[in-house]
Image (spheres, rainbow, N blue to C red):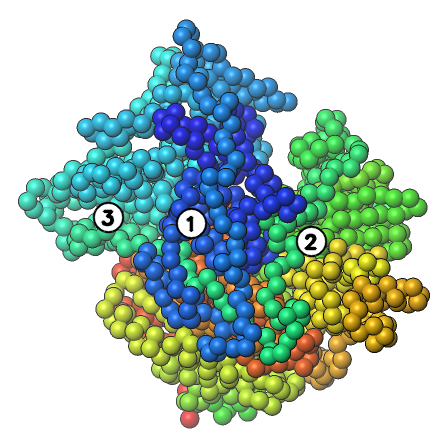
């Protein structure tokens, strides 16, 4: 938080800012407060820190300090905020773990909203709808014995705004002394000079002397260019403290803003004007405010300057179209020679009979760059509806903001009616054209938006109504209840909502991640040298220039690897450092080792590589199919008789579907610190899910035994499968550098390089043929899956196998065959991701299931219900389904979601609305729990009891936010009968528990929990005689007695899952220990003109057995669901035709934000469903909930079907994943899409499937 005294407002203004974009020089006369400065575990927590932790709003914890400081800055400015203030405060914050709900629940306690603490759906005076109707954690809405809340707001420390740290008085700006103003403030860096003038005259003189200098206020543009585009600006001019550029003046024509006014300041001033001026005069102000509301995040708006936003002339500027369409005036200041700068902007008042609207279409509603943005201004002849003047300004339709001048000329003297609409739309279709290779792609969608957004403006003006805006962040009850069995001891914490063990440290910034480890003496930093070509021969590598640069110690390449340069997590088909050829953009060819990160990265960019491109270049699944570029083996899973099944079918349907990839976007990128020791030893601090695999591959590369390598993991800032195998790419080269130079070496990848060099979720393409009866019962399915594996096998074979294991999802299909093809392409190797192939397999099923319903004209929920598995039925791989709870989950979800009432209301809504449609879908999931590789289903644990009674617990699992350590402590606490506060988990290390399986497959609580239980039972048995001898003694008494009697107080635990094993060749065996089940119902509302949608409602019923920790399990359900919302509706990876990733970072790759939470989210954990296959009757919960987000995609498809019916189109249709606004809009075909025409066949970027994702599903024919 940056605090400054604002002379104009005569108060201190506190602003949350992005530290990575705030130059130290810009903080002159500012007070800086970090998360460590407001409270700590050792001293005292601030209420902001305490509430996010105790409300279970911190999982991996990497985003938590940012959440804390955004909320803290809000409270410093406004001690009594309402929910709308929370909307603004968190627009720039992202979380990949929690699903956001618990963060809001904790911080809602600071707002002025009052709550009704009951189980009923309640409304509050602010008009927001609750996010939850209530959790049903293990019981119905009837009082249960020993019910306890997930957290108690009444136990929070009270918030007293008078006790905050005061602003340093010495930073108050004193009145300027008489005489000439002081000269510019100057800071000189290694390569950059920072000049801060105090007057406009000084600024103009400096600009004249340094014509190439950049003028910087917020650094939101230059900071990005320097960091990610490698730009160097030797001179920076910083005019933030020039009074004339900070002034705000009200004039008869409008408001004049100084060019250095922040966008937050502009917004606050316009809001005051709107509140105090006649409505007809403030339409321009309101249009600017509408755009500012969705302009980046609050942290950016707090520093970004109005003048800077104008002068960057971005082609997708949010504000410039409004300023252009409404005739705002930009005033320039000049020396009369070469220096010319923006000084102020006059935002004009609107006049009577003038209507102004602004629209922005982006992939994500909040904190996202525009696809197309527009402002439209129409003025009428007094007393008539005859157009006097029309101005249409668009961003995203050219290299700069574009005025539709030809269309505007056709409108004067026309009546505002259907004829004008037809003429204007035809004119816009001709005028607003784009080349197929235009930057940004989506050419057809963007052209369609120009027409659709004009039509929205047309309707707005016609009806004289402002657009209805839905509150961004809904909220719900602050209390969710959990129960434990009657009679359970209060000290027994199993089944209770215990707070994440590290939550308090994460909220205070005291939690240590790898890059928080203090620098070692003589430590060095590694930067990667990566390929810029996707498929090429390396002709030469010239590092001579890099070796001469400041701070560089060494440049290492393939010949410098002392051990084996061949590596790979499952198949040895990769290299530590590329040799001879590169097979993807981002392929690691070498490393530069230097004294600092900046020097290492600068030198790495100086390494010159000569290539010879090779053919073929294969990027997409379609290209791989054409070239028959597949890895072996090709898996087949079959049961029944396909020919017989199709003969018995009344109907046969064939089609195809594509599901795009997904970036893990863990908040903590890949990071390794390697410390060399004696005799070939190497100690590694790594953010990895697989300590044993890291150990073995590092040892292989270094040419030493695995026993010389120790891998330590304290915690990760998220993983989601992305750190199961691909973390070894970095760990091996960092260890190599440390061994070669005999000094500690560190590297943490920047976000863009992390995304380029490591893969994500496998894109899938499937072709299917399904046979079914008139009743909807499916008899036969033949499906072929094609997965884009990338340039190596990695874990792709196991991922494809799991996709085949889930090809029927939750449905009984007597005759079935699935085949899996792994496409060998020139992309970075794709890898494990939450769900591990299961979501891909199941989405294909749900896609054709919805089309079967459409083909038959039957309700989709009835077709799904008639095909659901029943108790005792066999899966395609011959496993008997026992303890099946699918039907219970299904029925409860129907009832809790009020599905049938929603369907009736939805049908009525759709019949009354042409351009918005609602959709509804309910889908099940059945997820198999176990590693499909048999040998991985094992775990170890090591437990020490010390003489003071404290317990040190170590196990083979790693903590990445999922609460594994917390659950393990709960298990140990129950077995040992000791308070959980006496048990400590320090870290995961290969020196304590060897040969561990990756923390993956949702099985870690099952495996490690059983191993911990085993070890603790051994210790408990050793202590039992002393309990018997001294029944009234304490835990400490028994431990000391055992110690003095020379009893071993340390024990190993071990567990292997019994009765597992499957053979693809014979299709026999038992691949899974058990199944987790769940059902979700979602309702959406689609804007058919833009393709945007609102997530209105989701009900989830999840079977997690007897939950070990309902707070953690609920967090996993919600977090997995929202990550799935990103997968199925938002997140899209784009590549250039040359194989370069274009979506590198949060600016272009969008994960769900706070505004993507459903307006109503109801999560229930199924009651009375114990699971005898896992520790304390629990079930796995990490991966299974993710697929339930496909209910949102299927609801979107349901809405699209409704829109297509209005256009006279019926029957099955295809809507691929992710169902982005572009895909949804183009699927809702209408007269506007017809004017624009079909998409171009090839543009500036490609989807890695190579398929369009639009079109119809064909019915082969009816039989009998």
The structure residue drawn at horizontal position 47% and vertical position 44%, both measured from the top left corner, is: 160
Query: Which numbered marker is on residue 715?
Result: 2
Can you give x and y, in whole percent of width and height, for residue 188 in the image? Answer: 59, 19
> At numbered mark 3, what does the secondary structure look like: helix, strand or loop?
helix
Label 1 vs 2, first from the N-terminus: 1
Where does the image place residue 114, in percent across and percent down from the top left? 38, 58
Query: In the rendered image of this protein, does residue 1104 appear above or below residue 778?
Result: above
Q: How many marks?
A: 3
Q: Position of residue 9 (x, y in %)?
A: 36, 29
Question: Which quadrant holds the C terminus?
Answer: bottom left
Q: Nearer the viewer, mark 2 or mark 3?
A: 2
Q: Secondary structure at mark 1?
A: helix
Q: Depth check: 509 or 363 in front?
A: 509
**Which badge, 1 or 3, is on the more N-terminal residue?**
1
Q: Which mark is residue 427?
A: 3
Q: Residues within 10 Å of mark 1 (few under 14, many from 20)?
A: many
Front tag of 1 and 3: 1
* Crowding near the residue tagged with mark 2, few <14, some 14–19, many ≥20 C-alpha atoms within 10 Å: many
**Quarter holding residue 1192:** bottom left
The Cα–Cα distance between marks 1 and 2, rounded to whole angstroms, is 29 Å
- In the rendered structure, the answer to whether residue 238 lies left or right of residue 1019 reads left
The one of 477 and 1193 positioned closer to us in this rendering: 477
Label 2 to label 3: alpha-carbon separation: 58 Å
Residue shown at 80%/74% (left/top)?
A: 1031
Determine the image quadrant of residue 325.
Answer: top left
Numbered label attached to residue 86: 1
Residue 683 appears in the picture as rendered: yes
Please tell me which residue is depicted at 26% across the width and 30% down the height of the picture.
Answer: 255
């Amino acid at each position: 938080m940056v605090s400054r005294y604002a002379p104009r407002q005569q108060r201190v203004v506190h602003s949350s800012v992005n530290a990575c974009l705030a130059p130290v020089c810009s903080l002159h006369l500012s007070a800086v407060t970090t998360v460590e400065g407001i409270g700590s575990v050792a001293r005292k927590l601030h209420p902001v820190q305490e509430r996010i932790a105790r409300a279970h709003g911190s999982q991996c914890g990497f985003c938590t300090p940012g959440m804390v400081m955004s909320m803290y800055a809000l409270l410093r400015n406004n001690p009594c905020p309402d929910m709308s203030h929370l909307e603004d405060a968190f627009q720039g914050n992202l979380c990949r773990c929690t699903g956001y709900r618990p963060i809001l629940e904790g911080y809602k306690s600071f707002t002025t909203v009052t709550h009704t603490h009951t189980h009923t759906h309640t409304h509050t005076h602010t008009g927001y709808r609750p996010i939850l109707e209530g959790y049903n954690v293990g019981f119905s809405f009837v009082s249960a014995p020993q019910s306890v809340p997930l957290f108690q707001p009444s136990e929070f420390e009270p918030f007293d705004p008078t006790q905050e740290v005061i602003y340093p008085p010495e930073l108050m700006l004193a009145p300027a002394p008489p005489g000439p103003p002081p000269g510019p403030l100057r800071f000189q860096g290694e390569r950059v000079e920072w000049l801060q003038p105090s007057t406009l005259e000084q600024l103009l003189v400096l600009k004249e002397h340094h014509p190439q200098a950049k003028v910087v206020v917020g650094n939101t543009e230059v900071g990005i260019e320097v960091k990610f585009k490698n730009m160097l600006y030797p001179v920076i001019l910083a005019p933030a403290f020039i009074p004339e550029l900070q002034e705000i003046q009200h004039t008869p024509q409008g408001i004049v803003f100084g060019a250095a006014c922040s966008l937050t300041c502009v917004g606050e001033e316009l809001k005051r004007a709107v509140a105090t001026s006649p409505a007809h005069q403030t339409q321009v102000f309101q249009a600017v405010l509408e755009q500012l509301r969705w302009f980046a995040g609050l942290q950016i708006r707090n520093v970004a300057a109005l003048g800077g936003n104008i002068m960057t002339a971005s082609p997708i500027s949010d504000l410039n179209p409004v300023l252009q369409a409404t005739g705002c005036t930009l005033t320039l200041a000049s020396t009369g020679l070469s220096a010319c700068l923006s000084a102020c902007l006059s935002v004009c008042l609107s006049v009577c009979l003038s209507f102004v609207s602004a629209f922005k279409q982006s992939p994500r509603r909040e904190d996202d760059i525009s696809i197309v943005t527009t402002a439209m201004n129409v003025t009428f002849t007094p007393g008539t509806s005859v157009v006097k003047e029309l101005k249409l300004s668009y961003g995203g339709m050219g290299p700069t903001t574009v005025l539709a001048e030809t269309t505007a000329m056709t409108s004067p003297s026309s009546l505002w009616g259907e004829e004008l609409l037809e003429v204007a739309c035809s004119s816009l279709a001709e005028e607003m054209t784009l080349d197929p290779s235009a930057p940004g792609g989506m050419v057809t969608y963007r052209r369609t938006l120009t027409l659709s957004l004009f039509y929205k403006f047309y309707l707005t003006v016609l009806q004289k109504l402002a657009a209805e805006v839905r509150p961004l962040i809904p909220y719900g009850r602050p209390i969710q209840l959990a129960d434990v069995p009657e009679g359970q001891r209060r000290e027994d914490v199993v089944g209770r909502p215990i707070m994440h063990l590290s939550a308090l440290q994460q909220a205070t910034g005291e939690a240590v991640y790898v890059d928080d480890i203090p620098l070692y003496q003589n430590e060095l930093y590694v930067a990667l040298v990566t390929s810029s070509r996707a498929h090429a021969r390396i002709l030469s590598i010239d590092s001579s220039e890099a070796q001469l640069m400041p701070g560089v110690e060494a440049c290492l390449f393939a010949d410098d690897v002392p051990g084996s340069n061949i590596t790979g997590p499952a198949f040895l088909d990769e290299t530590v450092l590329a040799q001879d050829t590169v097979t993807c953009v981002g392929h690691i060819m070498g490393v530069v080792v230097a004294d600092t990160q900046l020097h290492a990265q600068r030198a790495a960019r100086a390494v010159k590589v000569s290539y010879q491109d090779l053919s073929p270049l294969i990027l997409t699944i379609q290209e791989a199919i054409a070239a028959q570029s597949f890895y072996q083996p090709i898996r087949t899973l079959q049961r029944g008789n396909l020919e017989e099944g199709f003969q018995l079918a009344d109907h046969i349907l064939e089609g195809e579907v594509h599901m795009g990839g997904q970036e893990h976007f863990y908040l903590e990128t890949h990071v390794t610190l390697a410390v060399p020791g004696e005799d070939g030893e190497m100690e590694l601090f790594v953010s990895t899910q697989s300590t044993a695999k890291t150990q073995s591959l590092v040892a292989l590369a270094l040419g030493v035994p695995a026993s010389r390598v120790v891998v330590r993991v304290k915690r990760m800032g998220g993983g989601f499968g992305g750190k199961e195998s691909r973390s070894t790419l970095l760990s091996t080269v960092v260890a190599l550098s440390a061994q070669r130079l005999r000094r500690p070496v560190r590297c943490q990848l920047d976000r863009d390089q992390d995304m380029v060099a490591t893969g994500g979720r496998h894109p899938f393409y499937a072709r299917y043929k399904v046979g079914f009866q008139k009743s909807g019962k499916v008899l036969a399915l033949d499906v072929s899956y094609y997965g884009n594996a990338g340039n190596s096998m990695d874990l792709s074979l196991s991922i494809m196998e799991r996709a085949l294991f889930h090809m029927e999802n939750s449905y009984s299909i007597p005759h079935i065959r699935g085949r899996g093809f792994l496409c060998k392409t020139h992309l970075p190797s794709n890898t494990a991701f939450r769900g591990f192939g299961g979501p891909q397999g199941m989405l294909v099923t749900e896609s054709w299931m919805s089309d079967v319903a459409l083909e038959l004209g039957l309700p989709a929920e009835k077709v799904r219900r008639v095909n659901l598995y029943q108790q005792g039925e066999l899966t395609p791989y011959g496993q008997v389904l026992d303890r099946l709870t699918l039907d219970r989950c299904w029925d409860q979800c129907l009832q809790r979601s009020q599905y049938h009432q929603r369907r009736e209301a939805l049908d009525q809504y759709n019949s009354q609305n042409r351009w918005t449609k609602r959709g509804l879908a309910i889908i099940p999931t059945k997820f198999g729990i176990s590693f499909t590789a048999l040998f991985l289903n094992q775990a170890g644990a090591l437990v020490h009891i010390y003489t003071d009674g404290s317990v040190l617990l170590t196990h083979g699992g790693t903590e990445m936010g999922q609460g594994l350590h917390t659950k393990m402590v709960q298990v140990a606490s129950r077995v040992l009968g000791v308070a959980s506060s006496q048990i400590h988990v320090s870290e995961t290390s290969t020196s304590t528990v060897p040969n561990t399986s990756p923390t993956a497959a949702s099985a870690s609580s099952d495996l490690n929990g059983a191993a911990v239980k085993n070890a603790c039972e051994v210790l408990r048995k050793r202590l039992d005689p002393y309990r018997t001898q001294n029944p009234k003694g304490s835990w400490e008494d028994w431990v000391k007695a055992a110690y003095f009697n020379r009893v071993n107080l340390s024990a190993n635990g071990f567990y292997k899952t019994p009765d597992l094993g499957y053979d693809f060749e014979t299709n026999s065996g038992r691949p899974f220990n058990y199944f987790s089940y769940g059902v979700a119902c979602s309702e959406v509302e689609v804007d058919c003109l833009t393709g945007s949608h609102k997530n209105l409602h989701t009900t989830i019923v999840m079977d997690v057995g007897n939950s070990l920790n309902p707070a953690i399990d609920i967090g996993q359900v919600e977090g997995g669901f929202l990550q799935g919302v990103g997968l199925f509706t938002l997140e899209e990876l784009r590549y250039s035709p040359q194989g370069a990733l274009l979506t590198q970072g949060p600016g272009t790759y969008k994960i769900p934000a706070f505004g993507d939470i459903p307006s109503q989210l109801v999560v229930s954990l199924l009651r009375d469903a114990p699971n005898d296959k896992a520790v304390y009757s629990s079930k796995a919960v990490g991966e299974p909930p993710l697929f339930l987000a496909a209910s949102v995609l299927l609801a979107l498809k349901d809405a699209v079907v409704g829109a297509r019916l209005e256009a006279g189109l019926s029957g099955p249709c295809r809507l691929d994943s992710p169902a982005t606004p572009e895909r949804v809009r183009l699927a809702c075909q209408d007269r506007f899409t017809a004017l624009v025409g079909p998409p171009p066949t090839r543009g500036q970027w490609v989807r890695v499937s190579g398929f369009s994702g639009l079109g119809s599903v064909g019915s082969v024919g009816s039989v009998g």
